[in-house]
Image: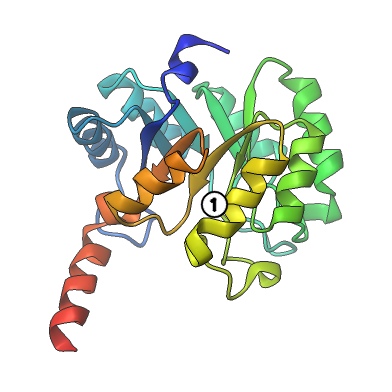
């Protein structure tokens, strides 16, 4: 594993993403967002689309977890769902590519097992991260050979509905860390510095923080809601 990836150990990864319906949607803005994150001390970036990643790479020399969010009519999966998205990401070669590794239906009815094996065969040297929503999914992804296991989807799928990553002092995370062989990246609703510090203390390799740093409309909303209460 290269030095860039080793530098992520015990460190913060900032997710710099803005979807087409969001005010900051623009590769230029995401590049500057990544630079701001680096100046603040971030050790890695998670980013969406080859265009955003290409721009971010001109601004920072940090390891990137790349994804492509795309909806398919026959699937609930939208994080790097098919080979098309993998190929796009490989044009800009992020250090890690993340994909949905939940049990939800994949495009064209493909299983995670089939898809991951095809991807690994095509790009054997690439590092991959599994975005999981349950302990079972994390264990399965670990068995398949993903390099990193993420808690990204906890609470966002039917099978994890009502679950919260931070519940019972990060019980789901603790169980995943204790049972898998690969590195665990804590992600999803980690919205305070204290929570970020805690997940690293519990054994996560790195922690990804997104909206609370990079989505001003959501940060503003939380203040407005608190005031209106």
Q: Residue furthest left?
A: 227
Q: Position of residue 163 (x, y in %)?
A: 58, 70
Image-quadrant location for residue 76: bottom right
Residue at x-position 52% and y-position 57%: 170
Left or right of 154, for residue 136: right
Can residue 88 be seen in the rendering of this structure? yes
Q: Position of residue 4 (x, y in %)?
A: 44, 15
Q: Which residue is mark 1?
A: 152
Tally of numbered tags: 1
Q: Is residue 173 above or below residue 67?
A: below
State which quarter of the image contains the N terminus: top right
Q: Position of residue 110 (x, y in %)?
A: 84, 49
**Front-most of 165 and 148?**
165
Can residue 209 be seen in the rendering of this structure? no
Q: Position of residue 115 (x, y in %)?
A: 80, 39
Residue at x-position 48% and y-position 19%: 5
Q: Is residue 198 above or below residue 50?
A: below
Left or right of 93, for residue 41: left
Q: Residue furthest top?
A: 3
Q: SS class of the residue under badge 1? A: loop
State which quarter of the image contains the C terminus: bottom left
Q: Is residue 210 above or below residue 54?
A: below
**Front-most of 228 and 166?**
166
**Front-most of 157 and 173?**
173
Crowd band around label 1 with a 10 angstrom C-alpha radius: few (<14), some (14–19), many (20+):
many
**Front-most of 205 and 16?**
205
Query: In this figure, which colouring scheme has been used for the structure?
Result: rainbow
Q: Residue furthest bottom?
A: 229
């Amino acid at each position: 594993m290269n030095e860039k990836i080793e530098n992520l150990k015990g460190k913060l990864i900032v997710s710099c993403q803005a979807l087409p319906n969001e005010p900051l949607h623009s590769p230029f803005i995401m590049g500057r967002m990544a630079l701001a994150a680096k100046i603040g001390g971030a050790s890695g970036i998670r980013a969406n689309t080859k265009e955003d990643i290409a721009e971010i790479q001109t601004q920072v020399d940090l390891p990137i977890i790349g994804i492509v969010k795309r909806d398919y009519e026959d699937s609930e999966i939208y994080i790097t769902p098919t080979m098309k998205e993998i190929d796009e990401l490989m044009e800009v070669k992020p250090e890690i590519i993340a994909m949905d590794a939940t049990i939800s239906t994949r495009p064209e009815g493909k299983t995670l097992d089939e898809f991951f094996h095809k991807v690994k065969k095509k790009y054997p040297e690439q590092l991959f991260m599994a975005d999981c929503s349950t302990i079972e999914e994390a264990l399965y992804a670990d068995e398949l050979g993903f390099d990193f296991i993420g808690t990204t989807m906890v609470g966002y799928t039917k099978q994890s509905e009502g679950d919260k990553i931070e519940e019972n002092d990060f019980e789901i995370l603790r169980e995943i860390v204790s049972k898998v062989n690969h590195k665990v990246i804590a992600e999803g609703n980690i919205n305070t510095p204290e929570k970020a510090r805690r997940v690293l203390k519990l054994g996560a390799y790195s922690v990804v923080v997104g909206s609370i740093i990079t989505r001003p409309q959501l940060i503003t909303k939380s203040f407005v809601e608190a005031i209106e209460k």
